[in-house]
Amino acid sequence: MPAKKKRVYNKSTGRTYKKGSYDGDYNAKNSMRRSKQNQARRVMKAHLEKKYGKAKAASMMKNADVAHKKPLRSGGTNKISNLKLQSPSKNRGRAGEGGRKKGRKRR
């Protein structure tokens, strides 16, 4: 007989959470994705600092996201030739890229 999964009780919210393999899988995938995004940001920052200097590079990256021309999940890389600066609203609102375009209905 398989062992029951342990439930974890959160005192502050009063909710009971089932502890399972989903949590570990999700956190591992999410942390890998975030580390690749952070790597892309470091690559872009180094490139801009070399080209324009630290002050100008900092101001350029202040309100911008680093976007991939070819997404990582489609075989894109973190090379500078595949990166571009984009406004957060545009980068996070692209259909098929984790966001959805404004005006498009959800399915």
Image (cartoon, grey):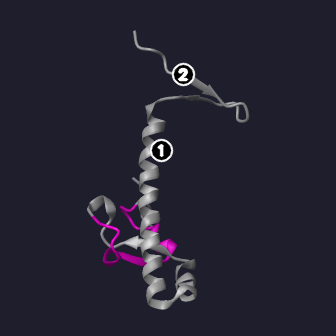
Q: Quadrant of the N terminus?
A: top left
Q: Amino acid at mark 2?
A: Lys
Q: Residue furthest right?
A: 12
Give x and y (percent) for residue 40.
42, 69
Q: Is residue 83 magenta?
A: yes
Q: Measuring 47% from the left and 44% from the top, which residue is drawn there?
A: 27
The residue tagged with tag 2: helix, strand or loop? Answer: loop
Q: Amino acid at mark 1?
A: Asn
Q: Measuring 27% from the left and 61% from the top, which residue is drawn there?
A: 74
Magenta residues span: 76-97
How packed mark 2 is, by other alpha carbons closer than 10 Å (few <14, some 14-19, many 20 or more), is few
Position of 52 compared to 10: left or right? left
Give x and y (percent) for residue 8.
60, 27
Give x and y (percent) for residue 49.
48, 84
Say above or below: 2 vs 59: above
Q: How many marks?
A: 2
Q: Measuring 57% from the left and 78% from the top, which residue is drawn there?
A: 62
Position of 75 compared to 50: left or right? left
Q: What is the number of the mark on residue 6?
A: 2
Sequence-earlier tag: 2 or 1: 2
Say above or below: 64 vs 54: above
Gap between marks 2 and 1 measured at Cα? 19 Å
Residue position marked by numbered label 1 in the rendering: 27
Viewer-closest of 11 and 79: 79
